[in-house]
Amino acid sequence: MALAPAQLAATADTGDGVNAPDLQVFVFALFFIFGGITSLNDVIIPKLKDLFTLNYFQALLVQSAFFAAYFIFSIPAAAIVRKAGYMRSASIGLLIMTTGCLLFIPASQSGMFAVFLFALFVLAAGITTVQVVANPLISLLGKPATAHSRLTFAQAFNSLGTTIFPIVGGYLILGSLARIDPQTLSGAALDAYRTAETQVVVNTYLMLALALVLVAGVVWTRRNRLPNVVEDSGSVLRAFNLLERPRFGFGAACIFLYVGAEVAIGSLIVNYLIQANVFAIGAAAASAYIGFYWGGAMLGRFIGAVVLRLVSPGKVLAAVAAGSMTLILITANSTGHVAGWSLLAIGLMNSIMFPTIFSLASEGLGKRAAEGSGIIAMAIVGGAVIPPLTGLIADATSLRFALILPAACYAIIAGYGIYARRPAIAG
């Protein structure tokens, strides 16, 4: 999902990947880290919504600030990779992520929602850089024929992070959410309350900053493990003409829609489950269920890594997208545990969508596969657009009705699966 340096294309030409099992473990670890940190947005959204008395549209601007970084930094990050190589670029990305975590300190001191959004934006810029390294690298470290399966397996480690982090983060961040109603406070008392309550967010991200510095140091010690073959392929802007190819352009659009739908649903889980006609529980307890949503994606990716070796990826994609639409229909028209668990089960359907769309769209690009992956990385900006639009619908109607937007996204993705069910012709 990112623009790779020229050695990716050069290696792909030989038909063989780089045989380095230890580096595959390293890439799996990166998927775990940036997946887990991204999923913490689902925990801090209800926290900030409560503290700053935001509506759904305003609260979901958290995802807009975060995922906008993919659109803005994908190409600059690719330029860093082209100059510095994979491992050095991974270290740089991890340090940018550390900076974003540390910016939560002034955000808490300011007591301003906008400063939190800026900290998240910087954090996401670092994650974008790391993903620019991780996605093409996992394709490079193995045979091209098994890229579908290998990328799906790597995404399973991403889901492992998104399963674990919300459980721990929910306990740390949301534990005190219901103790005081900030709407009963004003002036200095409200400012003091916001500063005190956001400190728990700061403490969580400070622990992450320490871990990221350590990982960056380890990665830096391996900075010379891969050759830095840099080739000037001209302006990166020429990659945009790939959008004229129907298979690729449709696939990039589906990445936009998939990320948007997945993030929108994940962002609303806590607020959805605490409703009286669903689980009727507190926010802290509801946050633990986020792990089931992302855990379903993790389980599905391990299963998908096997299934995609046996069944046409396009057919599998169409089937799981149809499954997501069915589950949305069930949750929107039921109550209690049926409504709650059918929403959470969408995670299982989401499991293979990103790696499958990515690999289907990239088929047939040949030497331009690296350019295409940069465009696809930019399409992740769907996570900045679809969630606040879903929130806008929720503010105007209800959370249940707002799920119509993610359902529409999945309908288009199902169509792409049918469209791309046959292998592409290289060109």
Image (cartoon, rainbow, N blue to C red):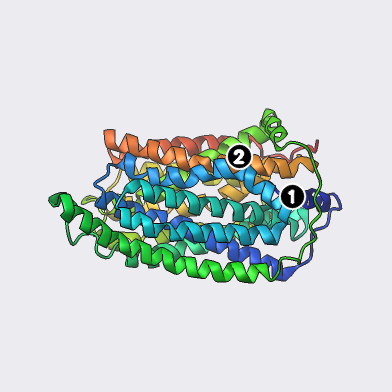
Residue 319 left/right relative to 165: right
- Residue type at mark 1 is Pro
Residue, disc 2: 417
Residue at image position (66%, 57%) is: 89
Q: Position of residue 44 (x, y in %)?
A: 35, 55
| Left or right: residue 311 compared with residue 398 | right
Q: Secondary structure at mark 1?
A: loop
User: Which one is in front, 114 or 44?
Assistant: 114
* Circle 1 crowding by C-alpha within 10 Å: few under 14, some 14–19, many from 20: many
Image quadrant where residue 167 sits: bottom left
Q: Which residue is mark 1?
A: 5
Q: How many marks?
A: 2
Asked whether 316 or 172 is in front, the reply is 172
> How far across and down, in percent of the image, does residue 405 sit?
41, 36
Q: What residue appears at the point 77 percent right and 53 percent down from the top-left corner? A: 144
Residue at 32% x, 57% y is: 109
* Above or below: residue 224 compared with residue 262: below
Which kind of residue does numbered mark 2 sit on? Gly
